[in-house]
Image: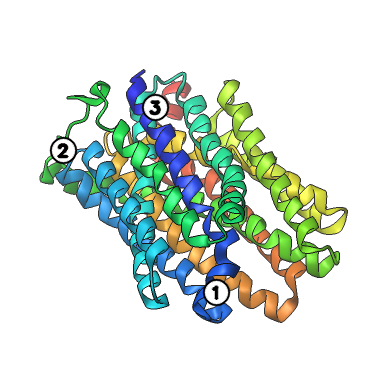
Amino acid sequence: MIWPFIFLSYASLFVFGLTDNIRGPLFPEILKQFAVSDGMGSLMFALSNISGLISSYACRYLLRRYDRLTVLKGGTIGLVVSLLGLAASPIFPVFLIFSFGFGFSMGILGLVPNVLVPMGSSPERKQRMLAGLHTMYGLASLMAPLLAASIEYLTGSWRWTFAIASVGPLCLLAYTYHPSHKSLHSRSTVTDDEHRANKKKNLKPQLFLAIMLSFAVAAEIMISSRLALYMQRTWSFSMEASSLYVTYFFVCMMVGRLIFAVIHFHQSARFLLSASLVGSLILMLAGLFIHPLFLAGSGLAVAPFYPLAISWISSEFPQDLDTAVTYMMTTDSLMLILMHLAIGKLTDFIGIQNAILAGSFFLIASFVMVNSYAWLFKKPSLLVQASTQAR
């Protein structure tokens, strides 16, 4: 166990979750301040998603040129500047520029911890350490709306929320200079020729697993982002009551990841990932056709998928983990953009309930990919193993 890697990663993802989730509660006040429409205002999210996609892919090259701590420091400094810029923006176009910088920095803070934790964990603790890592994001997701509401109540301005939130990455930046990190981080020793060889060998399976993971993430975000709208339009709940169901979903997610952080499950990665997807699908359907509490409870089933998938990917590509995680984060960003567009259009045409039901395709697609990976990419080794046993 390399504990400085673990502590740094946990702190990074906590800061990531806290800053990522303070924007939603402030959105109405930002629209009012700059006098822009909902469509124009949504550019603040779209631009940060696009820049996050760019930074996720750019990290593939940054991590070859610089060590992981230096890349993380750069992302942290960029996040501090972006938050202060968002707080001080005089006009909306300037606000959008800093939103782009915000997304780029967040892409780095979300990627590097997913590399450091597998590197810093022993094989028997890796699954639990990754589950604990994403529990930190769940905890930060719950705290962010409370922080945003409290600061705005005390100061009367959304700008102070962004300004005070910059304390989080500043503390993270200070921790990166702790003596425990001295001489611990090094540049990748893989040569350009080895990178080309790894790409030729690993590109297809890495992209396959990245897309598999992005389908499950799309289903998770679809539920969390559309649950309040579903409660209001289908069940005629108030905004406060529907928001409570979103809170239930995030609580279930945090509990699910906490369980996997504490308990080590001995079943295979394929079994656990399949069980997570099947459980999520059953609870989603029960939430749509029986009671919406099941929809909120689907967070419990989908919660372990992300850390389990990263654990599996790190076991498959231990020598090429930086590239594998880069592809994973890039496809996640792209899939989320496509998901939001598709679910938005489907909601307009067939209603929110049928749109969520159609979104179950993401879970089914991920399940098929989980269970076909070995057949597609391990088939030669499986045939050799079978012939050896026959002899």
Q: Would residue 314 be found to the left or right of residue 251 on screen?
A: left
Q: Which residue is mark 2?
A: 190
* Distance in Å between CA atoms under marks 3 and 2: 23 Å
Q: Secondary structure at mark 2?
A: loop
Residue neighbourhood size for the residue with mark 3, other residues' Cα within 10 Å, grouped as few (<14), some (14–19), many (≥20): many
Asked if marks 3 and 2 touch (Cβ < 8 Å), the reply is no
Provide residue 131's location: percent of width, then percent of height.
53, 32
Q: What amino acid is labelled 3 in the image? A: Ile
Q: Would residue 140 be found to the left or right of residue 358 on screen?
A: left
Residue nearest the observer in this picture, 272 or 173: 173
Q: Nearer the viewer, mark 1 or mark 3?
A: 1
Q: Would residue 54 be found to the left or right of residue 41 on screen?
A: left
Tell me which residue sits at (66%, 33%) in the image.
255
Q: Which residue is mark 1?
A: 31
Tell me which residue sits at (39%, 23%) in the image.
121
Provide residue 31's location: percent of width, then percent of height.
55, 74
Q: Which residue is mark 3?
A: 6
Q: State the image quarter where residue 122 is shown.
A: top left
Residue neighbourhood size for the residue with mark 2, other residues' Cα within 10 Å, grouped as few (<14), some (14–19), many (≥20): few
Residue nearest the observer in this picture, 16 or 127: 16
